[in-house]
Amino acid sequence: MTSPQRRARFAGTLARTLAVATAVGTAAVATAIPDQASGVSPAFGITGSIGGLYPGASLSLKLTATNHESFRITVTSISTTVHDASASCPAHYLTVGDYTGSLVVPVSGAGSVHVPVHLSHAAGNACQGVTFPLTYVGRAKKA
C-alpha cells in the first residue's frame, strides 16, 4: 500500500472514530454528614448529564445539587461511579473527576459545580450511541 493510500485509509478511520457520539445518563444518590452542633443530616439530590462525547474527548460535566431542607447546606464533596454502558463498552472507558469544596446551596434551591470527564481513545465504535449510567454520592453539612 502506498503512502497516500495509507493516509486515505487512516483519514477514513479517524473520521469514523470522531463521529462516535456517547451520551451519559443520570442517577442520584446523596449521603450527608450530620452537623456536629445539631446532629442534622441534610437531604439533597444530585443530578447531571453530558452528551457529545467521543473517543479522546475531555469535557466538563455539570453536577447540580438540590437542597430539600428548610436551611442552607454546604456540599463538601461529590463523587461519581460510572457503570458499564454495554458489554462492549465498559465503564473504565469513561473517567469522571470528583468535586471537593464548599458549595453553599440555598433553602429549597440548587447549586452547580463542574467536574472533568474524559472518554478514552480506546472506546471506539463499540461505544457509539451508548449511555453510561452514573451514580453520584455526595456529602453535605448544615451551612
Image (cartoon, rainbow, N blue to C red):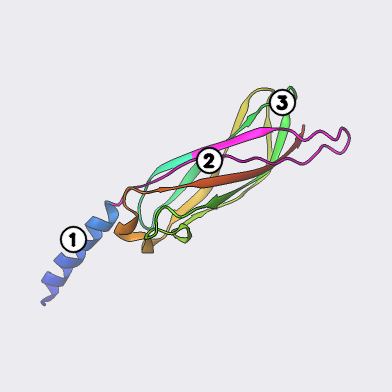
**Res 24 label:** none
Which residue is found at the position 80% from the left and 39% from the top? 34
Dominant secondary structure of the magenta stretch? loop
Vertical position of residue 26 compared to residue 117: above or below:
above
Of callouts 3 and 1, which one flags the residue occurring earlier in the amino acid sequence? Answer: 1
Q: Which mark is residue 12?
A: 1
**Disc on the earlier residue, 2 or 3:** 2
Closest to the observer: 76 or 132?
A: 132
The image quarter containing residue 112 is top right
Circle nearer the N terminus (1, 2): 1
Q: Amino acid at mark 3?
A: Glu
Give percent across and percent down for residue 62. 51, 39
- The residue mark sitting in front, 1 or 2, is 2
Local SS, label 3: loop
The quadrant in which the C terminus is found is: top right
Residue stretch rendered in magenta on the structure: 20-48
Residue at mark 1 to residue at mark 2: CA–CA distance? 36 Å
- Give the alpha-carbon distance from disc 3 to disc 1, as whole Å: 54 Å
Badge 1 amino acid: Gly
Q: Residue at x 85, y 35 (%)?
A: 39
Rendered image quadrant of residue 87: bottom left
**Residue density around tag 2, few if under 14, some if 14–19, many if 20 or more, within 10 Å:** some
> Disc 3 vs disc 1: which is toward the camera?
3
CA neighbours of label 3 inside 10 A, class few (<14), some (14 to 19), many (20+): some
Residue bearing mark 3: 69
Q: Quadrant of the N terminus?
A: bottom left
Instruction: Name the element at disc 2.
Output: loop
Residue 37 shown in magenta: yes
Picture coordinates of residue 15, whole percent (x, y)? 22, 56
Residue at x 20% of width, y 66% of height: 10
Cβ–Cβ under 8 Å for marks 1 and 2? no
Residue beneath disc 2: 27
